[in-house]
Amino acid sequence: MRSLMELVSLVTASRDYADLLEVMAEECRRALQASTVSLSVWERDRGTVRTLVNAGALIAGQEARPDDEVYGLADHPLAVRMFTEGTGYVQQRGQADGDPAVARLLDAEDKQSALGVPIHLDGRVWGELWATRALGEEPFTGLDVEFARLVAAQVGAGIAQAEHLKRVEQLVYIDDLTGLANRRAFEDRLDIAFAHHHELGTPIGVIVVDVNGLKQINDTQGHSAGDHALTSFANELAIAANALPDVMAARLGGDEFCVLAVGMPAEGVQALAEDVCRRAQHVLELGVACGVATTDTLPSHSMTGSRLLRAADAAQYRAKRAESAVPVVAGHRGVMPEAGAEEEPDRRAFRGRGSRSPSTLVDVVLRRLDDAADATAAERLAIVAQAVAETVDAAGWFISSVRQGTICTVDSAVARAVPDGSSRFYSVDEFPVDDYPASYAAASGQAVFVSVDDPRSDPAEVALLAAGSLSEMLMTGGPDASGDGWLLEVTGDELSSSVRPYVGVARALAAVALRR
């Protein structure tokens, strides 16, 4: 009874499928007082039995989780009867009328007796629980078979739960239409990849792909044609991704797809993106727009998963506006939209934020500053930066201190850069003031606007923006009451509204924040 209760508790605990089988096999061994226990599945279509897990005192060559331990069912008469009639069996070593195949196994494993009972799942035989006892131990009897059937029933319940959890997991992580991984699966894998990146330096590449003309297909040919276009491209994307190790293809939603490549150098990621674009031409009349971002080519000190995804998405938007048939790489300014090019009216916002007027922005910031009267200068400047970033749907914002000839970013956040609106903070290096005169001017109380397309902008600042696939930046700041200098920066990309209209109001709000 205690053994059965322990099995029930194991079954109800959520765990990995393979781990659950291993734990249940060991518990079955304890319950049956066996030397070894094996759990096997009946492969009906092949007429074979495949061992999934072995537990106990294994002989040389046996593995706890074997890859290819398979037996032909026709060679085991007792097993045939068990699988077809649902009966159990027991056999002693040297038994005259025993199954020759079982006898050979007992001899090979140097065991005294063996027991086999079926494991049922959904009303049919799923597999087998096989147990042995060593020489010198009490041999199995018919009474043990009856108890083993109760034990096998709990194993079947555990397998049923594990299979159910596996199906639920597939529903949670698989896109219904295309069968690719969905956004949740992609973001979970991206988080894991960045944990390895920060620990081991493993390179990461992200490819963002938009199907061109999907709205036109839906409007003119119907949504079934649009779905067909998406699934056709998804198949090509999967073929390209599956040919390489540690590559995941996902559908983020709508017409947007993504590829995550872990451990692949930047050149390999770009080659994969080029292959995706070529394949898209075979199944889509207008092809795709494709953007690439890699940790190899973007500043690593400020990189997070959401920032890498955003950089790839911004590069993809550049490709779409320029109608580029080849991938655009974040940090490379080789493909630019034509002057005066307009955004597509159905283009999604990266985070869905609406714009505020300058006067509304002032009201919002002043209310927040009133509620933070005891905050530090950095915290009060962060209130201003956060509000401006929300207003323009910014790529990020930074607060830096300026002391003894250096600019040191003390707090920074990828503000609202992921769909759930979360922020992530990280530390970055110090920068010499002499190398960034525009930043120093802003920290002295001026307002500075930098654009990668404006030849009058400070080249040092433009180089930083280009490296991060950013398009513009607002900078302002000034000294606090103690005389320490502070710098506020808000960066934008192709997915942001322009920060230019908010330069003046940001300067005024920063002055209010610094003077409490």
Image (tube, rainbow, N blue to C red):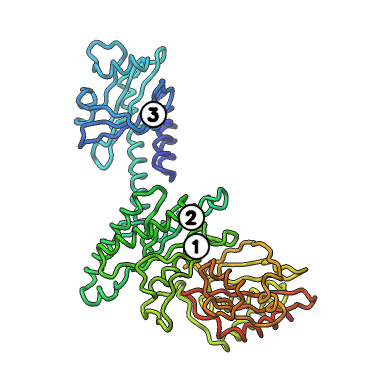
The type of residue carrying mark 1 is: Leu
The type of residue carrying mark 3 is: Asn
Residue 143 rendering spot, x and y as whole percentages: 32, 22
Q: In this rendering, would 375 be left or right of 76?
A: right
Task: Classify 41 as above or below 245.
Answer: above
Assess disc 3: are there few (<14), some (14-19) or many (≥20) residues with their C-alpha within 10 Å of its C-alpha. Answer: many
Q: Indicate the quadrant containing the N terminus: top left, top right, bottom left or bottom right.
A: top left
| Element under disc 3 | strand
Q: Which one is nearer the viewer's eye here, 316 or 368?
A: 316
Residue depicted at 40% across the width and 41% down the height = 11
Residue under circle 2? 204
| The furthest residue to the right | 482
Q: Which one is earlier in the sequence, the residue at label 2 or at label 3? A: 3
| The furthest residue to the bottom | 359
Q: How far apart are the alpha carbons under marks 1 and 2?
A: 9 Å
The quarter of the picture where residue 229 lies is bottom left
Residue under circle 1? 308
Q: Which one is earlier in the sequence, the residue at label 1 or at label 2? A: 2
Q: Indicate the quadrant containing the C terminus: top left, top right, bottom left or bottom right.
A: bottom right
Q: How far apart are the alpha carbons under marks 3 and 1?
A: 44 Å
Residue 194 rendering spot, x and y as whole percentages: 52, 54
Residue 279 rendering spot, x and y as whole percentages: 29, 60
Q: How far apart are the alpha carbons under marks 2 and 3?
A: 38 Å
Assess disc 2: are there few (<14), some (14-19) or many (≥20) residues with their C-alpha within 10 Å of its C-alpha. Answer: many
The quarter of the picture where residue 438 lies is bottom right
- Image depth: mark 3 or mark 1 in front: 1
Residue under circle 3? 54
Residue 86 rendering spot, x and y as whole percentages: 23, 31
